[in-house]
Amino acid sequence: MSELLRRLFAHPLILTELLTASLLINVLGLATTLFVMLVLNRYVPHGVDATLATLTAGVLLAAALEFGFREARIRLAAAITGPSEALRGNSAFAALAQTRVAVLERLPAGLLQEVMRGLDLVDRILTPANLCAALDVPFAVLTLIALAFLSPLLAVLAAGFMLISIATVILGERLLRDVVRGATAGETEAQAALGAAIHSADALRAFNAGGRTIGLWRRARDGVLAARRRLGERQSLVQSITQTVAVLQSITIVTVGAILAVKGEMSVGGLVGANIMAGRALGPINRMAGMAELFARADLALRRVHDFMRLPREHQSGMALKAVAGRLELVDVAFAHPGSSGPLAEHLSVRLEPGMVLAVSGPNGSGKTTLARLLMGLIEPVRGQILVDGVELRQLSMEWWRKQVAYLPQEPELLDGTIDEVIRTANPEMSEDEINRVVRVAGLRPWLDTSIDGIATPIINGGRNLALGVRRRVALARALATKGRFVV
């Protein structure tokens, strides 16, 4: 709900037009009630057909105008929700692509997918139709004012029932929020188990890990189902209360109105009209009660997205050297993984002149891959400097720096696309001759010549459809495509 209000107040001109349209819609909506009252009070006692025809024509005109204003309001609401959806989605994905790798690695498995899926959830909930439904809530007061002209007492009674419904909706949304948070956490755990079953299919079977993974899935799903049951119970309670309030309101209005009619203070048509107006005033609030769960989910998803977008990102600005000599130096560099008991490397200093080669060896976990990632700017040292031609790496544009490096990681990570597109990742302007050269140097040509699609072979799911050796040769060709002066 707060996001709806934020969007509205962010566009004051459109908000004014929306409020004007909502006012006219709610005023025209009273025409049906007025029609019923006049038919009962004027036509039924006297039976003048011309009166009925006039009233019918008038109410049909009001209905047509109301329809037109509703369509106009929907289009105005779409002008608010549409651009916001695109901007939020683009910003969230940009955050995913630019957040520091060291930060992403500390996030729970499955959380990133839940964050991005939350965007779709928000877009499905914060629709133009729901925005218009929320706009009808304040105009329920207009219906109460109209009711007050018929009977101030009935208007006061209807206002009391309206306040009860509003309190129920607000309290219900707060009660649902905690349950939704629990359900979402369980869905994240289930997503992690699902990802393991999909992406580690061989290991799952070869090492008989199916039982363990199934157990993780069942526990996560049991938690999700339990949370959903609680969610359903609380949502049903909120809806039951609001429906009961509507029934009690109708009974009260008819009872009190009947007494007033017997005393001659209200006509029968006025009694029927008062009951219709009271129900109409309560309608928008009851619709909000039906959407309490949806708004609670949307609020939680938005908080996750906003928290994610506040994570520290790689700096996108920085300098680019006009000429690259090829000198690299590490000065008293230290690095420690977050949460580790001690540094992985400390007091690391080395100077490489252009053309020099440095080979780093050591046991598993000694920091060889970490050193490569430090040089690429994927992670940052906790102390010390990495100098490129005498310039601190942090001062350089990461986009520029990574174009200067032919980087071949230990485990090849390939983006989905064709082999041609993947090789061109860091150098999209490569000519066909240059592509053929790096393919030949990487030893990829014999495999391409025997494949059906050749260099247009699709890479699916990070290259899992290709043999590991082929993936490594594709990664080597991609590294050579940068024409970098540095090789990591």
Image (cartoon, rainbow, N blue to C red):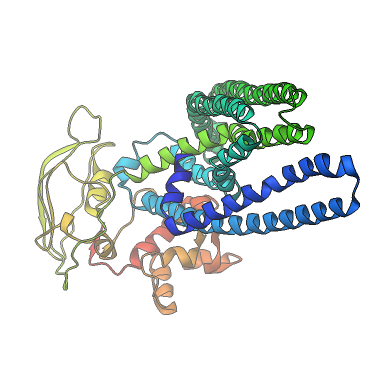
The structure residue drawn at horizontal position 69% and vertical position 58%, both measured from the top left corner, is: 65
Image quadrant where residue 436 sits: bottom left
Image quadrant where residue 433 sits: bottom left
Quadrant where the C terminus is found in the figure: bottom left
Please say whether residue 201 is visible from this viewpoint.
yes
The structure residue drawn at horizontal position 28% and vertical position 50%, both measured from the top left corner, is: 378
Rendering coords of residue 401 (x, y %): 24, 62
Q: Nearer the viewer, residue 259 or 118?
A: 259
Up-down relation of residue 274 to residue 32 (above or below): above
Rendering coords of residue 305 (x, y %): 41, 42
Up-down relation of residue 195 to residue 360 (above or below): above
Rendering coords of residue 476 (x, y %): 38, 60
Image quadrant where residue 21 sits: bottom right
Rendering coords of residue 297 (x, y %): 52, 35
Q: Nearer the viewer, residue 36 or 169?
A: 36
How many numbered discs sit on the rendered protein? 0
- Side (left or right) of 433 relative to 201: left
Q: Nearer the viewer, residue 44 or 95?
A: 44
Q: Nearer the viewer, residue 399 or 334?
A: 399
Please say whether residue 466 is visible from this viewpoint.
no
Residue at the front extreme? 264
- Side (left or right) of 66 relative to 289: right
The structure residue drawn at horizontal position 64% and vertical position 54%, both measured from the top left corner, is: 70
